[in-house]
Image: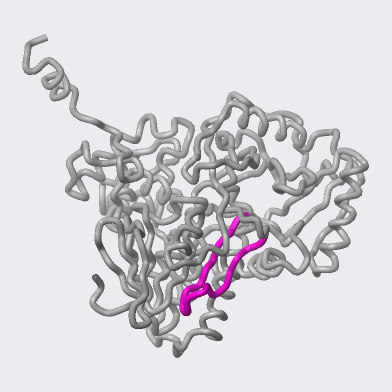
Amino acid sequence: MTKQPYDIAIIGGGVVGGAIAQRLSKYQLSIALIEKEEDVAMGTSKANSGIIHQGYFTTKGSLKEKLSLRSNTLFDEICPKIDVDFKRIGAIFCATNEKELKTLEGELKESQDRGVQVQLIQDPQKIHELEPQLNDSVIAVLHFPKAGIITPWELTIGLVEHSIMNGLQVYLGFEVAYIKREKQIYQINSVKGDVIQARTVINAAGLYADTIAKMIGDDSFNIFPRRGEYIMFDKNSMPLQKIIFPTPNVVSKGIVVSPTMHQNFFVGPNANEIDSKEGINTTTQGLNEILQGGLKLVKQLPFRKHITNFAGLRASTLVHDFIIQLSKLPHFINVAGIDSPGLTSSLAIAEYVEEILKNECDYKFIEKRNYLPTRKRQLRYSDLSESELAQKIRENPQWGNIICRCELVTEAEIVEACHGLIPITNTDMIKRRLRPGMGRCQGGFCLPKIMKIISREQGKIYEQVTKMGKNSHIVYKRTKNLCSEVFQGERL
């Protein structure tokens, strides 16, 4: 049990929880971030499109409209402060028939009423100049130039690390079992028996926000998981200038073809309601669906350059809007149902929560004198010129040992990451910070080397190094030991 109650405990280490922590860390408040997994950005924040939307196709008067419009403008301010890459490349919505064109014309007017910069283009030559890869069946596009792309887990890690620099305490592997309130203090109990106390709780638990709310008797909403599947293609396999959308439907913005921050591109997601909140498997039917959706937008897809498939889950509710409000108990704020455009809205959601706290909770919001305004990300091989790299190798030969050939990641970088603000305990944590395993071979060559480095740096037995924590073991036992057990010591 923590000796003194925290002022605020945030449950959920995704991009929304990280943004709230980063927003509040400038004040003289004690804050804890609680996450059930062994790392932040392990849920929706690690498996989504990474698109920063421009407030399009949102319901008039909704929180989604208000917060996505506000948040889009904040990325130019926040990303340089926390040293996270972000690009405004623009998004286009495509019409292939007159009915879809009417839908785009309607959105054109609504977006203009919102004050959004937008243009409807119907001239074939101008459409081709905007995005040469577009299918010839596209007769019009609605262009939003302020849409952008980001790497969602890098944003989450940047927000959390900046918060740690300013006093945030992070509790990883803390799965909440139950919550009770005594003498105006919340007791947050883990399945392992640990306890964290806090005066205020912010429930940003994503897919499990309804579960957390029910622990205090709040059954005002339910979360329904919606799965989206993706196909990722190799670097530079198809040059794209824009994020390409179809004309949206009532369920989602549709299957997208989009570049990433690291010169890959993806097709997806679809949108299917499922029962399991852990159902991140891909399906043959789903992958075929998104391939067909992609081919409606672009002339061709380089199928042989496909390197991986993955799926992510979105936290949907029957409200069809964000739920950000005080719960039935005082000092308990639900931040729930944060589906698309949740990543886009995350920075403004943090502002919105801050206002609720200021209006409803009895804290003095005094800014820290020693607040650190910026965070610098770890230096990478790709950041260095040839002369700078040569100097690094002279100082530390580990800079000359390439561990991941696909993404050009060195031993020196992995060693430094192992001892970062969030200590590394598994291989996926390295993957999200430095990208080894995200290239063409998907870790086929570098994974054993990364395991060896983590084992050495963290003092773990090699067999204990996992992929993502818990029971995600990569190596069971050494072959000779396994054979010895199977044959009970008999000679082969």
Which residue is rendered at x = 65% and y = 35% of the image? 238
Front position in the image: 238 or 258: 258
Front position in the image: 234 or 107: 107
Residue 464, by quadrant, is top left
Q: How is the image coloured?
A: one colour
Front position in the image: 301 or 359: 359
Front position in the image: 314 or 407: 314
Magenta part of the protein: which range?
321-339
Q: Position of residue 423 (x, y in %)?
A: 29, 56
- Asked if residue 147 is positioned above or below residue 401 in the image, the reply reads below
Image quadrant holding the C terminus, namely: top left
Q: Position of residue 44 (x, y in %)?
A: 52, 51
Kindly tell me whether residue 242 is visible in this rendering: no
Kindly tell me whether residue 309 is visible in this rendering: yes
The number of numbered badges drawn on the structure is 0
177 relative to 276 in the view: left or right: left
Image quadrant holding the N terminus, namely: bottom left
55 relative to 213 in the view: left or right: right
Residue 1 magenta-drawn? Answer: no
Which residue is rendered at x = 59% and y = 75% of the image? 352
Residue 170, by quadrant, is bottom left
- Asked if residue 44 is positioned above or below residue 10 in the image, the reply reads above
Q: Position of residue 25 (x, y in %)?
A: 43, 76
132 relative to 201 in the view: left or right: right
469 relative to 209 in the view: left or right: left
Q: Position of residue 35 (x, y in %)?
A: 38, 59
